[in-house]
Image (tube, helix red, strand yellow):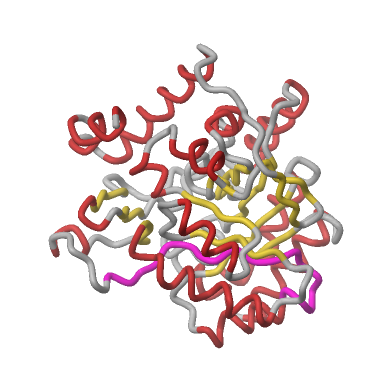
């Protein structure tokens, strides 16, 4: 209730990216004061890893691995950092994030703004040496904007080499709509070369997943699933943000902003993909469902339909910092 009042009075009137930075500062203060602490939830096993509850923070919120212990203390059983690129990059020009309250959604065209793989490797190395109260850590890998598509595999491999041994699992992100041409890498042959290059660096035993776009047809998603089986990956994440703007309630001036749409409008498609992928993927493959999750019932539904874990981002933005722990306790 307090967060909802704060959101309506202050955060809703603040630039979304500025509100994000304000939220980061608030979470850090709560953590340093000892007002948020890790709690134990039901154990979930996937990819040979033990997760403290099924709920995780999706990539995009903590791009540079700055809030991992804090997000764990808020109730997230795993935190996926990134998307990280081989080269540090500022991302797209501002404004690049837009709030759609009527749709409980966000549009972002951040453009993989991050400090680069080397900086993240240094941060994660120090973190693992200094703390033993950490969630499962995923590392989401993306392509540097200035690197041509035909050199993408080399670019992903460079990041993987710097970050090997520092993540509990890794994700190949070829599905963001905000890096020109990136989604073309979801095509089987292009994706195959990236997967093989990353596997060569991190080792075939390290859990590796592919994150796909919700805008893929079922047939295209199944082709990726077949490749996941063939190359021995650990599973898939479905799904990233969408370029669709169908059935939105917000003003046309807002929904025409370029970028990926996240939040409640993705519920249907993200849910549809789970049984589609589960039917094709080998039994030992993990599905992480992300997109439009807002309630405990929705998490239960996704787990029952075949997902092993779930992730949120936009739902957390709208529900507030105490929502993850409350959901995890109920589950």
Position of 328 with respect to 47 (left or right) is left
Where residue 322 appears, x then y in whole percent? 44, 32
Q: Residue at x 47, y 68 (%)?
A: 270
89 and 111: which one is in front?
111
Where residue 249 appears, x then y in whole percent? 18, 63
322 and 56: which one is in front?
322
Where residue 101 appears, x then y in whole percent? 23, 50
284 above or below 105?
below
262 and 270: which one is in front?
270
Position of 202 with respect to 308 (left or right) is right
Q: Quadrant of the N terminus?
A: top left
246 and 152: which one is in front?
246
Q: Which residue is drawn at 77% across and 73% down?
A: 283
Magenta segment includes 229: yes
Q: Which residue is drawn at 56% across and 55% down?
A: 310
The magenta stretch spans which residues? 228-245
């Amino acid at each position: 209730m307090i967060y909802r009042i704060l959101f309506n009075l202050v955060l809703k009137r603040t630039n979304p990216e500025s509100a994000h930075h304000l939220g980061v500062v608030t979470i850090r203060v709560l953590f340093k004061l000892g007002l948020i602490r890790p709690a134990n939830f039901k154990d979930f096993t996937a990819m040979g890893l033990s997760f403290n509850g099924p709920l995780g923070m999706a990539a995009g919120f903590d791009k540079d691995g700055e809030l991992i212990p804090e997000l764990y203390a808020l109730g997230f059983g795993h935190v996926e950092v990134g998307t990280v690129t081989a080269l540090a990059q500022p991302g797209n020009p501002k404004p690049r994030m837009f709030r759609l309250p009527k749709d409980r959604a966000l549009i972002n065209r951040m453009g993989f703004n991050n400090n680069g793989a080397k900086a993240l490797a240094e941060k994660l190395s120090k973190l693992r040496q200094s703390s033993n109260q950490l969630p499962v850590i995923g590392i989401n890998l993306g392509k540097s904007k200035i690197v041509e598509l035909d050199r993408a595999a080399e670019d992903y491999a460079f990041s993987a080499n710097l970050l090997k041994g520092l993540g509990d699992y890794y994700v190949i992100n070829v599905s963001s709509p905000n890096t020109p041409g990136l989604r073309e890498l979801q095509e089987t042959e292009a994706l195959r070369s990236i997967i093989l290059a990353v596997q060569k660096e991190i080792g075939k035993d390290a859990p590796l997943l592919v994150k796909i776009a919700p805008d893929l047809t079922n047939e295209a998603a199944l082709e990726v699933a077949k490749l996941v089986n063939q190359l021995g990956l650990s599973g898939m994440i479905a799904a990233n943000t969408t370029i669709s703007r169908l059935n939105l309630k917000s003003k046309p001036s807002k929904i025409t902003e370029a970028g990926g749409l996240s939040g409640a409008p993705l519920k249907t498609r993200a849910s549809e993909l789970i049984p589609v992928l589960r039917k094709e993927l080998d039994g030992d493959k993990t599905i992480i469902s992300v997109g439009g999750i807002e309630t405990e019932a929705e998490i239960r539904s996704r787990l029952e339909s075949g997902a092993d874990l779930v992730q949120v981002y936009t739902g957390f933005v709208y529900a507030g910092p105490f929502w993850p722990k409350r959901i995890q306790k109920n589950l």
